Image (cartoon, rainbow, N blue to C red):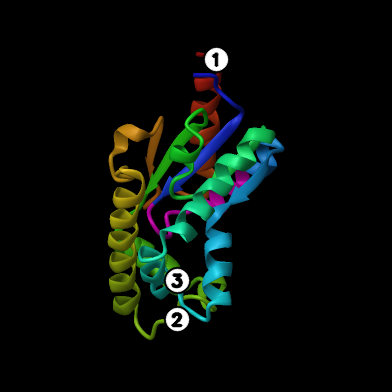
Amino acid sequence: MNKKHIISISGDLASGKGAVSNILIEKLNYEVYRNGNYFRQLAKEKGMDVTSFGKYVESHPEIDRKIENSASEYAKNHDNFIIDARLGWYAVPESFKVYLKVDLDVAAKRAFFDKNRKDTESFNTLEEQKQDMITRHNSENKRYLELYGVNRDDMSNYDLVIDTSNITPEQVAEEIEKEYKKWLEK
């Protein structure tokens, strides 16, 4: 397999994919491709929160395929970029595949207090946020298994797995950059 200068960052909800991607963009002078933004935009256009839209997509697989195919299409004509997408590793197998894990309680706090999420995720309590994250995770896994036959929770799919629960996005980006350079040299 030919390696491309592409890093695909997948991970748990609120694991820091966006923050880490932003740091790597600056450090590596790369572009970014974000499937999540596209998903949120489509949810908003339908007047749905992201969880409801995820359930809707379960019965409309053409939407999911369109979203995931967009990353692989982009990779055909681009190099030197980061894919911030749940299935970026699957869509672009010649990328350096990273998975960011996070403790569910830490993730729920991050998401609950993230002002950027409020237009597509609005909860009154931290516990509601946490339960929604569990629902979304299960829905996504079911969809990915049915549509693509892949289990994104299988850590053998990735070149690097990092737990972001107790480290900063800068530390995560530093580790990714270090391991990515080693991967490119192999």
Q: Is residue 73 left or right of residue 162?
A: right
| 66 falls in the magenta region | no
Total numbered badges shown on the rendered structure: 3
Q: Earlier in the sequence, mark 3 or mark 2?
A: 3
Q: Secondary structure at mark 1?
A: helix
Q: Residues within 10 Å of mark 2 (few under 14, many from 20)?
A: some
**Label 3 is placed on what type of residue?**
Val
Look at mark 1 in the image and give the residue it sits on: 185
Which residue is found at the position 50% from the left and 13% from the top? 186
Q: Is residue 131 visible?
A: yes
- Residue pointed to by mark 2: 122
The image's mark for residue 50 is: 3
Q: Which mark is residue 75?
A: none
155 left or right of 119?
A: left
Task: Inspect the image, locate mark 2, and give the three-letter code of the amino acid beneath it.
Answer: Ser
Q: Position of residue 51 (x, y in %)?
A: 39, 72
Q: Secondary structure at mark 2?
A: loop
The stretch of residues the image draws in magenta is: 12-24
Residue at point 48%, 79% (across, down):
48
